[in-house]
Structure formats: structure tokens, C-alpha cells
Amino acid sequence: MDAAALAASPFPAMVAWSFALLVFHISLQGMLATRELGSAWNAGPRDGDKKPSGALAGRAARALSNFLETYPAFVGLALALAIVGDASGWGLIGAGIWFAGRLVYIPLYMAGIPYLRSLVWLGSVGGLIVMAATIIF
């Protein structure tokens, strides 16, 4: 693939937006942990067993951990689609489904909403499957 075709691909922009989502996750988790434990804890070496124990800080940490489980797959698939191309457009649809699902997942997890949150997670994984299928078939 030539550089012009790669530059015209929407997938590098999707990776950049997903990075913004990653930064949001990290910031949310850090802000809630700092609010609970204080700035001295956050700035310090965090030695010992002291960890945030509040519901929101815990949910933010688990939501970030969950995001990190699928994020490498998204980045790899998006970059592969940028390289091989996406003539059908299904890869971009899958990427959009993954991204939208990950956006919706955050408030659902933070609010403690069961079942619907799991369905949204399944939908985002479905987006990854669509992306992979676009490459394979």
C-alpha cells in the first residue's frame, strides 16, 4: 500500500480517537483514586497495600482493565485494515461498533448497571469480529 492510500484510510484516525478514549479511562480512574486517597498518595510511590476501596474508584479501575483487554486487538485490527484496505466498508463499521460500545460501556459500568453493560461489551467484541472477518474473508 502506498503512503497516499494509507493517509486516506479512516483507520489511523480511529486509532487516534481510541487513544483519546484510553486517556479518558486512565484520567477517570486516576481522578477518582486521588479523590479518595489524596494527592500525596497519587504523587508517591504507592508502596504497600493501600488501594482505593470506594465503589466509583473501583468501577473506574475495573472499566479501565476491561478496556485494556480488547484495546490491543482493536489497534492491531485497525492498523491491519489500514494496510490491506477495506473495500467493503465492513471493517470501518466494525471499528465504529467497537468504539461506540466502549464509549457507552463507561457510564453503564460507572452507574453499576448489570446485563445491559454486558450486552454492550458483547456488541463491542462483535465489532472486533467484524473487523477480523473483513481481513480474513
Image (cartoon, rainbow, N blue to C red):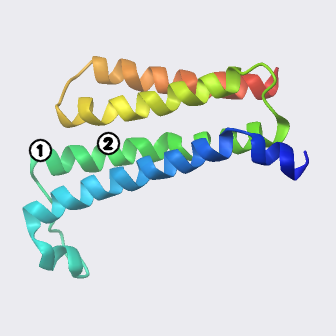
- Whether residue 129 is visible here, answered yes or no, is no
Q: Horizontal and vertical percent for residue 3?
A: 86, 52
Check disc 1 and give the amino acid type. Ala
- Residue that label 2 marks: 63
SS class of the residue under badge 1?
Answer: helix
Picture quadrant of residue 43: bottom left
| Position of residue 28 in the picture relative to residue 79 (left or right) | left
Q: Horizontal and vertical percent for residue 82?
A: 76, 41
- How many other residues sit within 10 Å of disc 1, few (<14), some (14-19) or many (≥20)? few
SS class of the residue under badge 2?
Answer: helix
Residue drawn at (40%, 56%) of the image:
23
Q: Are marks 2 and 1 in contact (CB under 8 Å)?
A: no
Residue drawn at (13%, 79%) of the image:
40
Picture quadrant of residue 32: bottom left
- Residue that label 1 marks: 55
Say which mark, if any, is on residue 66. none
Q: Is residue 115 above or below residue 55?
A: above
